[in-house]
Amino acid sequence: MAVSIRLSRGGAKRRPFYRIVIANSRSPRDGSFIEKIGSYNPQLPKDNENRVIVDLDRARHWLSVGAQPTDRVARFLDAAGLLERKARNNPNKAVPGEKAKERAEERAQKAADAAEAAKAAAEAPAAEEQAPAEEAASNSEEA
């Protein structure tokens, strides 16, 4: 029988409360369990000592027997100093997808075009100011 240490949900709608239980891995999430070894209340602030309560002796026993904790329970046990959890590394997590890259390129192109148009618009009045000054100078020479 494969045994796991996992969370079993309780509480009302939008007010979750979890029991940390030892259960057969084939049983439903909120179904029957072998033993309750703690609780987790995500509604409490993270620094509250009652947010996660674990009976470390029983958890140690079940880990020695071969029970496999889920990821979330492994985090709790790691925080309690009972289990060493390997840190995960996903270097591609922050890399944007293809569509996002295309949208970023389009935005950059539009920004470059707008900057170029603004520069051309700024140069055009300056050129127009020089042209009337030259015409006025040529008119004064003729007179």
Image: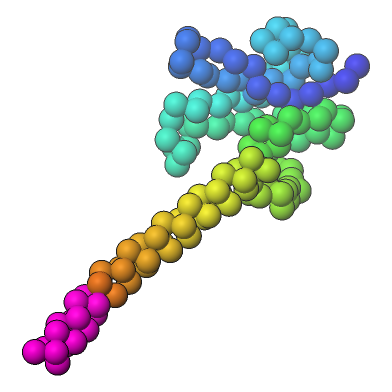
Q: Position of residue 53 (x, y in %)?
A: 56, 31
Quadrant into which the C terminus falls: bottom left
Q: Position of residue 109 (x, y in %)?
A: 53, 55
Q: Is residue 81 left or right of residue 25?
A: left
Q: Position of residue 17 (x, y in %)?
A: 52, 19
> In the orientation shown, which residue stands out farthest toward the front?
142
At x 46%, y 57%, the residue is 113
Residue 12 appears in view: yes
Q: Nearer the viewer, residue 103 or 61?
A: 103
> In the orientation shown, which residue stands out farthest toward the top?
31
Q: Nearer the viewer, residue 88 or 11?
A: 88
Q: Is residue 112 left or right of residue 87?
A: left
Please identify the dominant SS of the magenta region: helix
Q: Position of residue 105 (x, y in %)?
A: 58, 52
- Highlighted range, magenta: 129-143
At x 47%, y 10%, the residue is 13
